Amino acid sequence: MSNDSIQEMWKDFKKTHPNAPTDFEAWAFGDSKEMADELAKLVLEGKKTATASNYTLYELDKEPLPHIGLHNIILDGDGKAVAIAETTSVDIIPFDEVTEEHAYLEGEGDRSLEYWRTVHEDFFKKELQEVNLDFHHKIPVVCEKFKVLYK
């Protein structure tokens, strides 16, 4: 992760957003360089304004959940800062109740709920296997919406 690009982007952002909070999260989408690059590109294009993550992993890692107003520095596959987004909503929903709207806002593939379910089921199965848990269609999913503030 390129800490210099993260700090530089945050410093530049604060010049035009002096009332922004002092803290932020910096992270990349997915579990590979290719996925991080592809999804960061969708954010920059304005197609991706939502994301979904596995609630169980937040619990196991004792990590705080995202919250409204959280500032996120989105990283590409090389760990370079590409955008700053603010979380605008967070809902925890069973996997099989994630909406067509949320799938569309994630901006991936053909933006359908069917596509979303297929790729996220595979992704969540892989994540859960790593912690010796099984996937089921009622696993809680953190559905987060965001708006890009700076790129």
Image (cartoon, helix red, strand yellow):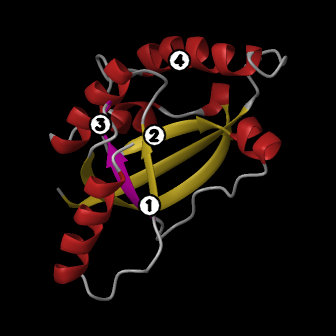
Give the residue at mark 1. Answer: 87
Q: Is 68 placed left or right of 1 in the picture?
A: right
Query: Closer to the observer: label 3 or label 1?
Result: 3
Sequence-first tag of 2 and 4: 2
Q: Is 59 placed left or right of 26 in the picture?
A: right
- The answer to whether residue 125 is above or below residue 111 is above
Sequence-first tag of 2 and 3: 2
Kindly identify which numbered label has been placed on residue 52: none
Q: Are marks 3 and 1 in contact (CB under 8 Å)?
A: no
Give the residue at mark 4. Answer: 117
Task: Report the amino acid beneath label 3.
Answer: Asp
Sequence-first tag of 3 and 1: 3
- Residue 72 colored in magenta in the image: yes
Quick one: label 3, few (<14), some, or many (20+) residues within 10 Å?
A: many
Q: CA distance from mark 3 to mark 4?
A: 24 Å
Secondary structure state at the residue bearing disc 4: helix
Sequence-first tag of 2 and 1: 2
Residue 57 x/y as whole percent: 73, 37
Quick one: label 2, few (<14), some, or many (20+) residues within 10 Å?
A: many
Give the residue at mark 2. Answer: 51
Give the residue at mark 3. Answer: 76
- For image coordinates 67% across by 21% down, the residue present is 127
Query: Closer to the observer: label 2 or label 3?
Result: 3
Sequence-first tag of 3 and 4: 3
Q: CA distance from mark 2 to mark 3?
A: 15 Å
Secondary structure state at the residue bearing disc 1: strand
Give the extent of the magenta segment: 71-77
Residue 96 x/y as whole percent: 65, 25
